[in-house]
Structure formats: structure tokens, C-alpha cells
Image (spheres, rainbow, N blue to C red):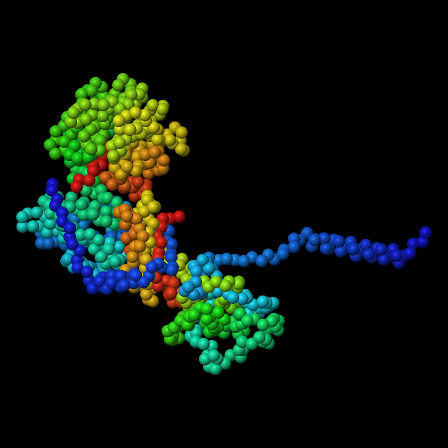
Amino acid sequence: MSVTSFLLPPLPLTRRHVVIGGAAAMLLPSLAGAQTHLGVSGGEVAPIPIAIPDFVAGSPADAEVGVGVAQVITNNLKRSGLFAPIDPAAFIEKITNIDAAPQFQNWKTINAQALVTGRMTRQSDGRLKAEFRLWDVASAQQLTGQQYFTSPEYWRRIAHIISDQIYERLTGEKGYFDSRVVFVDETGSKERRIKRLAMMDQDGANVRYLTRGADLVLTPRFSPSTQEITYMEFGQGDPRVYLFNIETGQREIVGNFPGMSFSPRFSPDGQRVIMSLQQGGNSNLFVMDLRSKSTTRLTDTPAIDTSPSYSPDGSRICFESDRGGKPQIYVMAATGGAAQRISFSKDDTNGTYSTPVWSPRGDYIAFTKQGGGQFSIGIMKPDGSGERILTSGFHNEGPTFAPNGRVIMFFRDPGGNGGPSLFTVDISGRNEQKVPTPGFASDPAWSPLLS
Amino acid sequence: MKVDKTLVASIALHVLVIGWGLVSFSSRAFESVTESIPVEFVTDDQLSKLAAGIKTGKKENAKPLVEKVAEARPVDDAVGKISQKQPIVTDAAPDPVPKLEEKPVEKKPDPPKPVTENKPKEAPKPIEKKPDPPKVDPIAEALKKEESKKPAPKAEAKATQPPPVKKREYKYDSESIAALVDKRDPTRQAYAGETLNSTPALGAAKGTAATLSQSELGAMRARLKRLWNLQGDETPEEQTLTVRIWLGQDRRLSASPQVVASGNTPRAKAAAESAVRAVLQGQPYTMLRDETYQQWKYMDIDFGPEM
């Protein structure tokens, strides 16, 4: 699945731009500081209106893929909540040549702030060439331009990569569209539920099933290399932590321990797996080096320590423990030692916290909070301050961060005879969206960016 | 013992009168005496007002140059208090040419003279600094506001000439009607400082009371705030930046806006680009007035997080 990319150079400046630039340069030396200052405090937190016309077809056979790419980009940007794609029915100008500057007045009229133009061309060697330009409508300037070469079947991935470029250029944040999600697919009645490990693109396309559903699977987690998944499976005996290679389909048991092993997660370098091992009525945290297979014990308490998650720099671990009586979130050094409790419920003293996961950006820890008869998804800073509940309800659980740390995916069970579904929500609590899945779905885990 | 009836009657009458007085006046005695307290209002309009001054003045000296103050002020100024507000400017108003030229054309019955028939209580004291503008009826006064802007006695300190004003044609203008129906008392404008201040102040090059009003600034601020599009409020420190703009008389940008200060992170750059988009989208800035062009032709706009 190789994608090669080249920078698309900006179009030559029109005379108008040169004149304006020259005038500014002439004005500059004489004016040191303006006498009038105008303070503007706070802008609108509103989506950016963006126009994404269908990509131009390089040859008549490419028309379909051109429409498809524009649709995938539109869908991605719209779901992010940060963009408001404009209905193509409102477009005045039809883009026919992406190597000529568009008539910006036509796009200003429909209030577009940004415009994406692109072209898909099947090459003589069978590869697909994708080109796109991102325009700032107000200043009539090209913000970025890129061309890609890949196999025709990966056109969706090209659309995700272009979406990431647009997202990053306009928001200043890294994108997250070129990524995948592994989750537990659930089918069948509530009593005879079949749980299979499944993987899909972050937008719900390209679903693949990784296991056949003979055994119960839980808590799948991506490796930073994205080629491996670790998860827990109830086999014939005790639940075990497995390692699964996506490319080869091979799987192996991690370690050989007496009793249960569960809630595994990779270290940021992908070389180790941290997990809980059952010891009598208690469980403790262990880390296993995948190359040397050596195991290190990190906690030793007469309590249940579980759900460990590394900080992105690998120096610290957050985990859930009931050593204080009720499940709470603790943080300790990655080498073990003293742990510090960071979760303190303000409104409900009986509130419990579980399933902590550290953001890839390092700034927040997401968690499931239980209290007042509700399950909530929230985030807090690694020192426990700034707690923010993003969503509450009958049953919400299992948060996982998008690669850029801006979006959280979780699963929600409405109760009754239905089943769980996947949802995304912004870390500000805005823009909650259901993620399309073939059936019921739970336990999502977001992959890192593929490229 | 013989009692004088007249004495009894007198006492009875006195008691009656004094008693009545006690009853009837006592209710007044409970009323609180409201004394007038002089209150000086300082509006933000005043704060933003740029006074006339000279180029070599110091920034700290906010007050205009005043060498002496007239010793007495009129006891009862029939024209009204000195207004800190802008006179209503109309398109129909005649050009501010020197008054002497204007006079023969439309002969008003009242050249500025110390005593008029309408002002019997005018103080006879000589007023050196501030001659009274002609006393006219409110409508004529409103129309001639522009004309009454004759140079103040300290005009030489300003060393300025009347700004060249384009020839105007009469046209329908709702503003001029607004001026005609303006029911406020006639006022005159302050041209020089009221207090003693011997240091020349740094003011606008053309400090003829052409101040950028808070309503102009407020309207522009509101427009930019609405157009400045942000993605999330997670990092307010990355939303602090300054954009410098140059505006032409047509209220459109005459040069590309420049980001003169912003953070260096990708998010800060995105916020700055969004601010530039807002500035470009906001034009033309129709809320700005011709009179204040000197103040808005070149501006720094400081964008910052919500306060």
C-alpha cells in the first residue's frame, strides 16, 4: 500500500498580487507603528465554510473516482465538526482546469473561506495520479498543493491523506483521517452474542474481520507500528492476552502465566506490552519485553490494578486501582514505584473512575466515570486537574484517542434489547457523532496515523 | 380676676396660627433636602478622543497646550454647556471655508456680538479664549455647525490648515434629516484646553475634533469578532496576535494585511491566518466615517482570546 507524494508548486502570481505586495513593502519603512489599535477579544468557534467540488477527471474513465474522492473528503471534514462543506448545488463556477486560478469572486459569493480543487488521472503505467490545491478564497492564494501516485484501489486512502493535509493547513492541528479503528463486532441475540475482532477505516469504510467469533474477544489495542494488535481472548481455559499480526494473520499468546492475563496495551515504542496478571483475588501490573520475553512486575498490592496506559514519552503510566477502596485512577513512573491518585470526584463522593488512557499529545487522560447512576466519558490533565465530562448516559465506556488527541471514540449501550455502538466526540465536548458499523460494536481502539 | 378678652383672643389666635404652622410645616421638615452634587462624567468617548497637538509634543502630556485661562466665565451661558460630543455633520452643510467669505452670501442677522436681544443675562465680562458662536435658532444652528468650526484662538499652536474637503453636491441623506430633527439644545464645542498646561501635547496631525468614536470602533470590532473563525478554545495563549492593515478612502484594504505579531506554533499560525481572512472578508468597513480617515487609514488590530 505505497503512496508517493510530491509538492505541487503554487501557480505563478498574477499581476495584482505583485502590485499589492510591492505597495506594502513601500509603505513599511515609513510607518513604524499604527496610532490606532483595535482590540478584538475572542472569535467565533465555528466551522470553516469550505467548498469541495468534484475532482476533475484527467481522462473520461476517471470521473467516478473524482466524485468519490471529493465525497470522502467532504464526509471527513464534515464529521470533524471543524468544517462546514458547502452544498455543491450552490456552486457558481465549475472547476475544469486545476492549473488555472479559480474565479475567487464566485466562491466569495457563496461565503466559502477555503476551496479545494483536484484532479484524478490514470497513468499509462496503471497507477493513479491525484493532484489537489487548497485555496484561501479571501486572499486569493494557494495554501498548499500536492500530488500523489498510488494503485487505483487505494483511492480512499488518497482522499484521507488529502483530508489530513487540508485539516492540518487550516486548523494547525495534525489530522487523523488516514487512520484505522479496531473494534469488537457484535452480532446475534443478547444471550448468544458472537464477538469478532474487526478493523475498519476511521470513517467506517473497508471493514475487515480478523477473528471468526468462536471465542469471546475483548480490549483490542493497536501497536504503534500498526501492523500488530494485542487483545484479550477467552479461550478454553483462562482469558489470555494475544498478539495478532494484521498482515500475516498470525497470532500468539503473550507470555505463559498461571491465571488470567488481561487489559493489555503496547508501550509507545511498540517493544513492550503492559498488562494485568491475576494473582489470587488480586491483580498486579506487569510489563513484558516482546523481544527478550522477560517480564517485570510493576505493582505489588493487595488490590486490583488494571487498565494501564503509557504516557506518549513512555516515562509514566496511568492505571486503575481499587487500593483505596473504590476504583480510581493513579499515575506512577514507568519503572514502577509509588503511585499518586489523580481522580477525585467533586460532585459525587461515591464516583469511581476506570479505563484511563493517555492522549497521544500527552495533555490529557481520558476515562470512564461511574456515579449517580450514569456512565460518563471525560478527560482530565495528567495531574488530575481540569476534569471535563464530555458525555453522560446509561452506559458509555472505553475511550480511545484519535492520533491527534483532539477526538475521542467510545462505545455506548442504550440498554434494553439493543446493543452498543461507536461514537466520537471532540475533547471540548462538542460534535458528538455516531460511527457507522455493520452491526453492534464495542471496545474501539484508534490506530496511529498510517503514513 | 378679670381677664382681658382681647388678650385671650390674641393668645388663642396665636396658638391657632402657630399650631397650624407646626402641623402644616412639620411634614416639609421630614423631606430630605436634596443638594445638587457636581458630578463629572468621563465617558470612554473622551478617553479615545485625540486632542490637537504638535508633532514635537510628548506622549505623556495628554492635555492640549494652554498658556492661560480666561479669568471669568459667563454666569449664565445661554448657548449651553461645552459639549464633548461630536457636532452632527451633514452632507448638506456648507464647506468649512473661512467665515468672512460666507457672511455676505447668506446674511444672518446675528454676527457674533457680545449682547444680543435674546441674551439679556449675558455676562458683560470679556471672554478672550472662547468667543460665543452666533446665537441662532436650533435648526439653523445644526445646519451651520460645520461653519461654526472657526479656528480656535490656539490655532497657531496646532500649525494646521483646514483639511481639504471635496466639493459636495446636495443629495438626499437621511443623516441631514436626522440633524434637522435633532432636538438637543444648541451647544458649542471646546477647541482648547480648559486647564492651564504649558507643555505642548502630542496629538493628531489634524486635531480638529475628528475622533474615532467608540461606536465606529465597536462596530468594526463586532464585525471582526464575528468573522474571526476559531477551531476550539483549548489554547487561548496561541490566539494572541496583531494584524496591521492599511485602508483607503473607499474603506477597503489598500495593501495586504500583515501579521506583525503571532505565535510560532502551527495552531497560532492557523489563528493568525483566520484573522487575516476575517480582515479581508470584513471589507468594506462602512462603519468608519470620512472625518476620521486620519485615524483609521492605518491600524493595528490586536486579536486575543475571549476575556
**Which quarter of the figure has residue A378?**
top left
| Residue toward you, A322 or A310 | A310
| Residue toward you, A89 or A34 | A34
Left or right, A51 with respect to B102, comes to left
Please say whether residue B98 is visible from this viewpoint. Answer: yes
| Residue toward you, A420 or B119 | B119
Residue B99 % position (x, y): 47, 77
Does B62 appear above or below A362?
A: below
| Residue toward you, A400 or B117 | B117
**Which quarter of the figure has residue A347?**
top left
In percent of the image, x 34 and y 28: which residue is there?
A340
Left or right, B76 with respect to A119, comes to right
Residue B286 % position (x, y): 36, 63
Residue A120 % position (x, y): 12, 51
**Which quarter of the figure has residue B220?**
bottom left
In percent of the image, x 41 and y 64: which residue is there?
B55
In percent of the image, x 11 and y 42: which residue is there?
A2
